[in-house]
Structures are given as C-alpha cells and as structure tokens.
Image (tube, grey):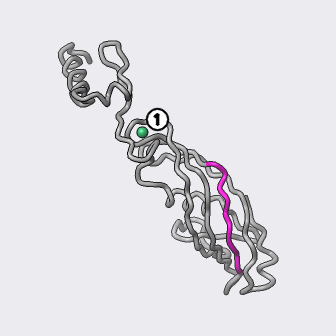
Amino acid sequence: MTLDVSGALKQPGVPFALDVVQAIAPQEVFADVVTFDPARLLGTYTAVEHGNVLLRGTLTTTARGHCANCLEPASAEIREDFEELFVLGGDPEDNEIFVYTGQEVDLERLALTTAVLGLPIRMLCREGCNRVPAYETGGVTVTHCQEELPGQRPFAALKQLLAEKTGEGTD
Ligand SMILES: [Zn+2]
C-alpha cells in the first residue's frame, strides 16, 4: 500500500503516527517458499531535510513455511524494527536506498525487506524439533515416529536407496 505523507511534508520535523497493514508476497527463502500474513507496521513517519521522509517503527507478522528438519508446516512470529529514509526523487534503480516521488510512499519493499530480515535462520515446527522428513523405502512410508526409534537412521536408508538405484543402472 502507499502512505500519503502530504501532511508530514507540510510540517517537517513533526512525527506522524504510522499504523498500516501491508501485504507481503511469498518469498523463496532458504530453499523454501515462505508466505507472510499481512504485516502491521506501527511507528512514525517524519519529513526531514530535502523532502525526504523517515519511517521508523516495528513490523509484526507471521511467516509460514516448513520446518528445516522434518519439513512439516512451520511458522514464526516476526517482530522486527525498521528505520528507513525515503529519498524524494531518488534513483529507483538504486537498491541501496528507498525512494519515493510525489507525496506517496510505497511501503511494499520496506515491509518485505524488514520481514525477511526478521526471519529465523531455521524455521522449526516446534522448539527443538530433531525429526527427519518422512520418506519411502520398499513401498513403505517411514514416518517421524518410526524414525525416532533407535537404530533406524535416515541416512542409512537413504544410502540403501541410492545403492539400489545405482544397481539398477537406470538413466
Ligand atoms: Zn519439525
């Protein structure tokens, strides 16, 4: 969405309340496709020198992807601060800065970059998940529960699968 900053531009240096909801497009992150709930941006926007506008505040959203260990659906609550200067008439090709023209600031890229910054390195379905993905062996699907039995290690089975495949001489 765009934020009308015309009021702030008339009163430089005066912080105006920012409280908006911005949609964030799904992102490919860490080999997973992460979707985001609509993000709330809460804070202030202030016109500063040269007609530039400073936005600062906190973004909150929920990211939804898959557990880094067991690949089951996982989500993460994101709460990330931002402080970005939107440069009036700046070069839109310059990815290092945020720019705007006229009197409207587009919040999409700010929300996206802030949300991605707030993502955990590894999203887990639950704290301390150490399960492995379900997989199929000999026509039988081995699930997480079975996997947690001692002596059944995923890599052993994987190795066996690979050996079988090589043995068949496919491709
Ligand atoms: Zn998990």
Q: How many marks?
A: 1
109 lies above or below 62: below
Q: Secondary structure at mark 1?
A: loop
Q: Seen in the image, is 118 located left or right of residue 165?
A: right
Residue visible at 78% across and 69% down?
Answer: 4
Which quadrant holds the N terminus? bottom right
Q: Position of residue 55 (x, y in %)?
A: 65, 73
Residue visible at 67% across and 59% down?
Answer: 40
Magenta: main secondary structure equals: strand
Ligand 1 quadrant in view: top left
Q: Residue furthest front?
A: 149
Which residue is denoted by mark 1 in the rendering?
A: 72
Q: Give the amino acid type for the residue marked by disc 1 in the picture.
A: Glu
Residue visible at 35% across and 40% down?
Answer: 130
57 lies above or below 150: below
60 lies above or below 132: below
**Along the line of sight, the residue nearer the viewer: 119 or 7:** 119
Q: Is label 1 within 8 A of ligand 1 (CB to nearest ligand atom)?
A: yes
Q: Seen in the image, is 16 located left or right of residue 24?
A: right
* Res. 145 image quadrant: top left
Mark 1 surroundings within 10 Å by alpha-carbon count, few (fewer than 14), some (14 through 19), many (20 or more): some
Q: Position of residue 97 (x, y in %)?
A: 56, 71
* Res. 114 image quadrant: bottom right
The boundaries of the magenta stretch are 37-46
Q: Position of residue 60 (x, y in %)?
A: 61, 59
Does the stretch in magenta take in 149? no
**Along the line of sight, the residue nearer the viewer: 97 or 26:** 26
* Res. 168 image quadrant: top left
